[in-house]
Image: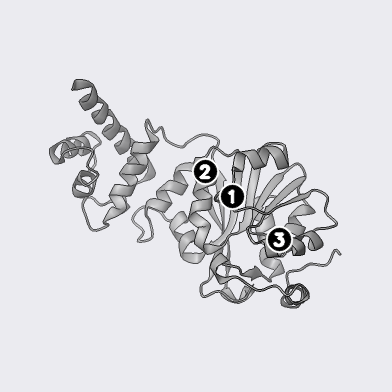
Amino acid sequence: MNKRLSSHIATMEIVKKHNFKFTKSLGQNFLIDDNIIDKIIDGAGAKKGDKIIEVGPGIGTLTRELAQRADKLMAVEIDRNLIPILKETLAEYDNVTIVNEDIMKADINKLVDEKLDGGPIKLVANLPYYITTPIIMRFLEENVNVTDIVIMVQKEVAERMNATPGNKTFGALSVAVQYYCDTEIIAKVPRHMFVPQPSVDSIVIALRVRPEKKYNVDNEEIFFKTVKAAFGQRRKTLLNSLTSMGVLEKEIVKEVLAEAEIDEKRRGETLSLYEFAHLSNCINRRIEVIKNGK
């Protein structure tokens, strides 16, 4: 069965054959466009030797195409009603392992070791919108040996991930993703390219995970707290937003900003990744001085 499943007719044939009911709470929207499928695969650079995880494979439309290029593929699907469909559509591919689990609860590193014989891996997925950010951050924060994340996400989320300082969409998510990755927009995907049709347009974005961090950060916990505080109330100046962290008193925050050579009247969305790294290091050093001085 080498024919592609990425058409409305082929998709609905399978849906009807298995009497499958779409679950809105799981964000199930199946892609029905060959061109976008190819762009996802090309964006991932899927090739022999690759080990790939796909989250939310649906009926296996993208999975089948990836299986023809990669060495090993693990398809992680939360909906048990899709497992019989996947077993049918992927039957001819012995390099695919189907896992019926919630990726947010699964031990990702254990799965990679058991099903793919360890990393490095690529994450390639048409992610359900409601879990986009948590899934991406799990892969980035939990030391998963991942080199590339190529995903279809809601247009606004992709724009935030790819945003630059000073842009109105630049925020905590932009900094968090760009701390780990270089970002690249692969394709814009109108809502009519899915069944059922979602209420928003999508974008395929590639996150190229850097082997080493771009800037030195002494304490990642303080770094992310600083970022979160800076964007907590966008209209606040850095002086006020960083004081609201509750870590340092206002006068000390003033001193730290001066030490970092950052104007206290600036707002979080104007800071570059380097400035956030530098500022958080200054904050961390001051915290250590106070702690050791007491």
Residue at the spot x=77%, y=59% of the render? 64
Q: Along the polypeptide, which appears first: circle 1 or circle 2?
A: 2
Q: Residue furthest front?
A: 80
Mark 1 = which residue?
A: 149
Q: Residue furthest top?
A: 293
* Quarter of the figure with the N terminus: bottom right
Q: Is residue 92 above or below residue 209?
A: below
Q: How far apart are the two marked residues, 2 and 3, measured between alpha carbons?
A: 23 Å
Across and down, in percent, residue 169 comes to 38, 60
The numbered disc on residue 113 is none
State yes or no: discs 1 and 2 in contact (Cβ < 8 Å).
yes
Mark 3 = which residue?
A: 62
Q: Nearer the viewer, residue 178 or 61?
A: 61
Q: Nearer the viewer, residue 170 or 94?
A: 94
Q: Along the polypeptide, which appears first: circle 2 or circle 3?
A: 3
The part of the image, by quadrant, that contains residue 261 is top left
Amino acid type indicated by mark 3: Leu
